[in-house]
Image (cartoon, rainbow, N blue to C red):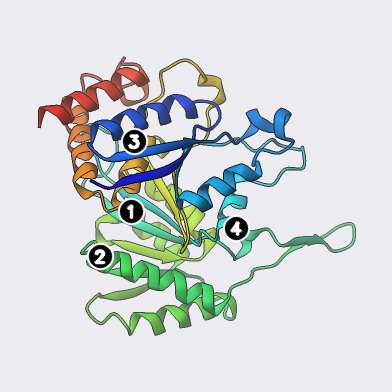
Amino acid sequence: MTRHRVTFIPGDGVGPEITAVARRVIAASGADIEWEVVEAGEAVIPDYGTPLPGRVLESIRRNRVALKGPLTTPVGRGFRSVNVTLRQELGLYANVRPARSLPGIRSRYEDVDLIVVRENTEDLYAGIEHWCGRDAAESIKLITRPASERIVRFAFELARREGRKKVTAVHKANIMKYTDGLFLECARKVAEEYPDIPYEEWIVDAMAMKLVQAPENFDVLVMPNLYGDILSDLCAGLVGGLGVAPGANIGDEAAVFEPVHGSAPKYTGQNKVNPLAAVLSGVLMLRHLDEAGAADRIMRGVVAVLTKGETVTYDLGGTASTDRMGEAIITEMKAE
């Protein structure tokens, strides 16, 4: 059995509670993980003067894989988003957000199973902004050929590896003919390298409508940064919300796995928030580490708990604590 050394960042707010459950579930899966615990977020600012101490980046660079809880970036105190900084410092160019229907999770839809692949390093979301005098501000939308080809190729490789049926490029090239036009040109070029995988294109506003109308028609979606930020939350809404949405930020040298939702500070220490987003992020991490068997065991445990519906937290319609739901997942894993 291969031992994996993984950086562990508990996070702010409810982060320590949900990620602790994820760690216990991963331990029960049979994967051999050695955790290196480092602290980041709002809670460490008094000690380090920053929410992202250098030792956090050093740990991730050394271990190449991290599991983290949600982090709070203080408002109005001059700190950049911790998540954006992590992505840029570590070259995590691909944001991967699966949206999969789960039993027992309230939703208007059934059988949704798609993945949003979002370019993570440029576009308007990169925040290249400045004032133009006193009464106007300008934000620069940067799209480059290397980054566009890289993210589209990543999406096709993911589709091929996971046996997905189609890749859809999302854009607004009808209006932004240079920037989104370049992204679309790159997508078409890369698509030619994968004749075994069907390829299509949708304008982003039409894509939003079609996802609400018929999400079952889509599989892997690839798009620039800002569209990915918006549509990935829409897709989470199709399957029950951010509380069940795992995420991954992947680059050539490192990968960081995290629940998509925020730190929910008002619930800190109450042991009541469902841990699924953290647990499912752990599943993504295990697949990245080629621990498919362990990942499958966790998924069977999660599906069993949700199907029975007897040991779920308040936000999923039950009365169980965060810890108790984690224990139930482990019990179901052992029953296999």
Dot 4 falls on a residue whose secondary structure is helix
Name the residue type under label 2.
Arg
Residue 230 percent location from the top left of the image:
50, 53
Does residue 315 sit above or below 53 in this rendering?
A: above
First along the sequence among labels 2 and 4: 4
Closer to the camera in the image, 191 or 87: 87
First along the sequence among labels 3 and 2: 2
Identify which residue is drawn at 11% across, 27% down: 335
Q: Which residue is mark 1?
A: 288
**Residue 279 marker:** 3
Dot 2 falls on a residue whose secondary structure is helix
**Residue 88 marker:** 4
Side of 145 where 25 appears, left or right? left
Identify which residue is drawn at 50% across, 76% down: 183
Name the residue type under label 3.
Val
Side of 314 where 303 appears, left or right? left
Does residue 100 sit above or below 145 in this rendering?
A: above
